[in-house]
Image (cartoon, rainbow, N blue to C red):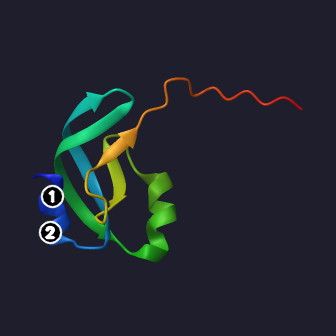
Amino acid sequence: MKWQEVRELYPSQFVLVSILDYHLEGDKKIADEVAPIRTIPEEEVNKEFFRVEEGNIVYHTSNDNLVIHLRRDPMIRVSL
């Protein structure tokens, strides 16, 4: 299913989706095909965001595209 179809089925909601296919554009992963799993009530979004399994994502349907910004260097240096 395309992200636009998910947006039409679940307007203005958080949804848990499985990413089936994507393409890369620079440091962005853009989903082409997704499978909706379920909607997430707003009060549970934070908890679900941290429990999500690999290949799935919690995303809000107000976004035109499902875009994941990739971090190339996840090491953050902090000097004290």
Q: Are marks 2 and 1 in contact (CB under 8 Å)?
A: yes
x and y, in percent, of residue 19 in the image: 24, 44
The residue at which mark 1 appears reads as 4
x and y, in percent, of residue 77 in the image: 73, 27
- Quadrant in the rendering for residue 22: top left
x and y, in percent, of residue 5 in the image: 11, 61
Name the residue at 14% across, 69% down: 8
Q: Is residue 33 above or below residue 24?
A: below
Name the residue at 51% across, 63% down: 46
x and y, in percent, of residue 80 in the image: 89, 32
- Quadrant in the rendering for residue 61: bottom left
The residue at which mark 2 appears reads as 8
Q: Is residue 75 above or below residue 52?
A: above
Name the residue at 23% across, 60% down: 37
SS at circle 1? helix
SS at circle 2? helix
Compute the Cα span from label 2 to label 1. 6 Å
* 5 to the left or right of 42: left
Residue type for callout 1 = Gln
Residue type for callout 2 = Glu
Name the residue at 35% across, 26% down: 26
Q: Is residue 17 above or below residue 23?
A: below
Q: Residues within 10 Å of mark 2 (few under 14, many from 20)?
A: few
